[in-house]
């Protein structure tokens, strides 16, 4: 008896290439797209190790936990790293990026996270891209949490290395990811003696042995389960329409935010300004004296399938932050409504006064006004 996940035929090189082309269309890019067969940390690390070395002066923007990791990799490569950290309740501005360049004109690499699922903020990449281009630095972007939830346009924005993963707003599997690579980024890698070669982290291997060879022979047996799942999730996005998918995420964020503001009980949006809030997930600050972990756990007891979690990438945030991960198939009015209801009930149990009906009404109104 054949099994739906097992007994799969090998994936051909032509099929693999067609999935790459589909991902390139999703990104509206003419750059090379390399699909990486691992969770997004694989291309995120591979792209930094490929391009950075002792001569690199990197501006590393920290708006959440991933920026910290990128800085560590950059330092490990021998790069000089200038960290620009902003509070997690806000976004970085293009003006702050410009200031950093004015102070350190030698910056030749910028690493930035587009949207942060962990902290719930999103950064103005288009405006930042203009500044980065003006100074000629290489632009590295983690778009794992933004792809599918909001526009991601590496060519328009001048992004040289744009990393995406399937597991957030694309509604796909976690075991596959991709990176678009500009000609400039390839040149930087080719000239970098430290760039991984003959290594699982090597993007250059894919260029030299796959892309430059006309995509005839794969480097190793493709992970067909993940590749087929990636193809299916891109197909599903194409069927719904990318603009409709991103609109659904924007509506979920607006509705959650409006609902929480109407709910009361001391629960507040974690990101202060709505324009800085990511469409992929809404982070909330627990009322003072109430542990976020406890509140999320209580809400999940009544509604175990809701995409609620405490914390944002570990550490201190777990005590104060709740995340509503309204992405992928969870970007629905139903999920927003039930999340507000479950959180409201948990707050009420703690003796706090909430207006659940008002919250649900405000959420519905906000959802409608984004359509
Ligand atoms: C989710 C996410 C990733 C992928 O990391 P996981 O550890 O698999 O969650 C990378 N970058 C960002 C910004 C993310 O939100």
Image: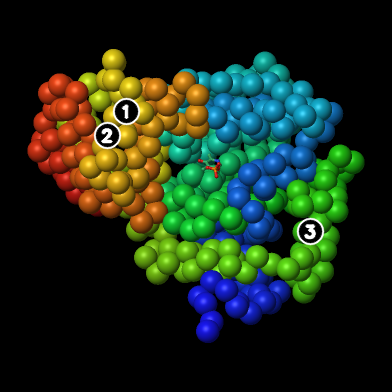
Residue 298 is tagged as 2
User: Residue 112: which quarter of the image?
Assistant: top right
Up/down of 119 relative to 191, above or below = above
Percent position of residue 209, x then y: 82, 63
Callout in the foreground (1, 3) = 1
Q: Which residue shows up at 45% across the image and 38% down it? A: 117
Percent position of residue 301, x then y: 27, 40
Q: Nearer the viewer, residue 370 or 315?
A: 315
Residue 207 is tagged as 3
Percent position of residue 278, x then y: 40, 38
Q: Which residue shows up at 53% across the image and 46% down it? A: 144
Q: Nearer the viewer, residue 304 or 270?
A: 304
Q: Nearer the viewer, residue 299 or 114?
A: 299
Q: CA distance from mark 2 to mark 1?
A: 6 Å
Q: Which residue shows up at 58% across the image and 41% down it? A: 142
Q: Nearer the viewer, residue 35 or 139?
A: 35
The quadrant of the picture showing ligand 1 is: top right
Q: Which residue is mark 1?
A: 294
């Amino acid at each position: 008896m054949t099994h739906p996940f097992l007994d799969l035929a090998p994936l051909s090189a032509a099929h693999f290439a067609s999935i790459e082309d589909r991902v390139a269309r999703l990104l509206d890019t003419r750059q090379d797209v390399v699909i990486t067969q691992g969770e997004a940390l694989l291309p995120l690390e591979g792209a930094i190790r490929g391009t950075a070395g002792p001569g690199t002066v990197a501006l590393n923007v920290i708006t959440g936990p991933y920026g910290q990791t990128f800085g560590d990799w950059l330092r490990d490569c021998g790069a000089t790293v200038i960290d620009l950290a902003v509070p997690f309740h806000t976004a970085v501005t293009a003006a702050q990026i410009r200031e950093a360049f004015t102070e350190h004109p030698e910056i030749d690499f910028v690493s930035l996270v587009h949207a942060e699922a962990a902290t719930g903020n999103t950064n103005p990449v288009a405006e930042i891209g203009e500044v980065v281009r003006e100074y000629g630095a290489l632009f590295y972007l983690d778009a794992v949490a933004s792809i599918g939830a909001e526009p991601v346009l590496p060519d328009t924005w001048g992004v040289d290395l744009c990393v995406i993963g399937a597991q957030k707003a694309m509604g796909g599997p976690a075991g596959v990811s991709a990176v678009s690579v500009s000609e400039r980024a390839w040149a930087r890698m080719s000239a970098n003696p430290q760039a991984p070669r003959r290594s699982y982290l090597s993007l250059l291997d894919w260029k030299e042995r796959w892309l430059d060879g006309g995509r005839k022979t794969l480097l190793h047996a493709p992970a067909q389960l993940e590749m087929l799942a990636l193809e299916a999730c891109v197909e599903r996005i194409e069927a719904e329409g990318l603009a409709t998918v991103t609109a659904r995420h924007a509506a979920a964020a607006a509705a959650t935010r409006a609902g929480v503001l109407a709910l009361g009980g001391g629960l507040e949006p974690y990101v202060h300004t709505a324009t800085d809030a990511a469409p992929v997930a809404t982070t909330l600050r627990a009322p003072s004296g109430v542990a976020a972990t406890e509140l999320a756990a209580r809400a999940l007891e009544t509604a175990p399938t809701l995409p609620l979690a405490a914390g944002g990438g570990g550490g201190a945030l777990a005590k104060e932050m709740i995340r509503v991960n309204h992405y992928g198939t969870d970007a629905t009015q139903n999920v927003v409504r039930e999340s507000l209801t479950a959180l409201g009930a948990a707050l009420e149990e703690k003796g706090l006064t909430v207006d659940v009906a008002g919250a649900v009404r405000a959420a519905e109104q906000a959802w409608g006004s984004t359509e």
